[in-house]
Amino acid sequence: MRKETTENLKKECVLKIILYAIVFTLLLSQTVIAGDATTVQELIKCKLDAVTQVLQKKDLAQDTKNKEILEIVMPIFDFSLMAKLTLGKKYWPGLSEEKKDRFTELFVKRLKNSYLEKLTLYSGDEKIVFKDPVSIKKKIHIPTELISQDNKISMLYKLYKSKNNWKIYDIEVEGVSIVQTYRSQFDQVLQSGSIDDLLLKLEQQENKPPLSNSSEDLETH
């Protein structure tokens, strides 16, 4: 009887140890996630503050501002992944390495031009408000609001952790994903044409100024 009681106590002890270990692991995981979320939010805040400081320099020519801004934001964008996501599994795997490289090059130029064009709308009265970051699996979303005197625009920065640092892989403006918007445009071209047709259209628009929408429309005729 005593032997059975001793064995039961041992089992209870082992179960408690396992339970405590699980609880400790979960708490530690939540602490790490919370720490990552704070780190990512500070990263975005630091970059946006730096961009704002450049925009406020009245003595700088626009080309110089653009160059400085790109130097600030380039390291936190994974442009190559964004290019891949815009074509998705339906088209990307079937491309040759040469066409992948060419598409990525044209897409990145298009994205940079669009981003810089949006910044020309900066008046100096805008304020960026950060909301609580959201952890979704291994990704972190940073919700913000760009508030001006007569307008408020919600922006959501989506990041994942690469080998070296956290990287932006998509941005939502008023709930509209930049990646999804481009994917929809590119899909319209590819449904009736080929990747060469898409590359040609991107090349033709390479030197055109971007429109004021979240991404420029591609002509499909």
Image: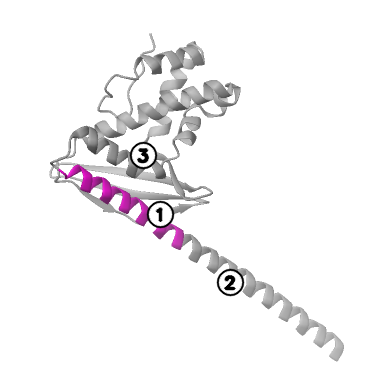
The mark that comes first in sequence, 2 or 3, is: 2
The spot of residue 95 in percent (x, y) is: 57, 21
Q: Earlier in the sequence, mark 1 or mark 3?
A: 1
From what the image shows, is residue 35 above or below residue 194? below
- The type of residue carrying mark 1 is Val
Q: Residue at x 41, y 26 (%)?
A: 107
Q: Nearer the viewer, mark 2 or mark 1?
A: 1
The three-letter code of the residue at mark 3 reads: Glu
How crowded pointer 3 is (Cα within 10 Å; few <14, some 14-19, many 20+) is rated as some
Q: Which residue is mark 3?
A: 172
From the image, give the main secondary structure of the stretch colored magenta. helix
Residue 218 lies, in percent from the top left, at 36, 18
- The reply to whether residue 175 is in sight is no
Q: Is residue 37 magenta?
A: yes
Distance from label 2 to label 3 (Cα)? 35 Å
- The part of the chain drawn in magenta is 35-57
55 vs 87, left or right, is: left
The Cα atoms of the two marked residues, 1 and 3, are separated by 17 Å
Relative height, residue 59 to residue 24 (above, below): above
To which residue does mark 1 refer? 40
Taking the image as shown, residue 85 lies to the left or right of residue 203, namely right
Crowd band around label 1 with a 10 angstrom C-alpha radius: few (<14), some (14–19), many (20+): many
Q: Can residue 87 be seen in this snapshot?
A: yes
Outermost top residue? 221
Q: Secondary structure at mark 2?
A: helix
At horizontal 48% and vertical 60% (from top left) the residue drawn is 33
Disc 2: which residue? 24
Q: Closer to the camera, 67 or 130?
A: 67
Residue 35 found in image quarter:
bottom left
Of helix, strand and loop, which one carries label 3? strand
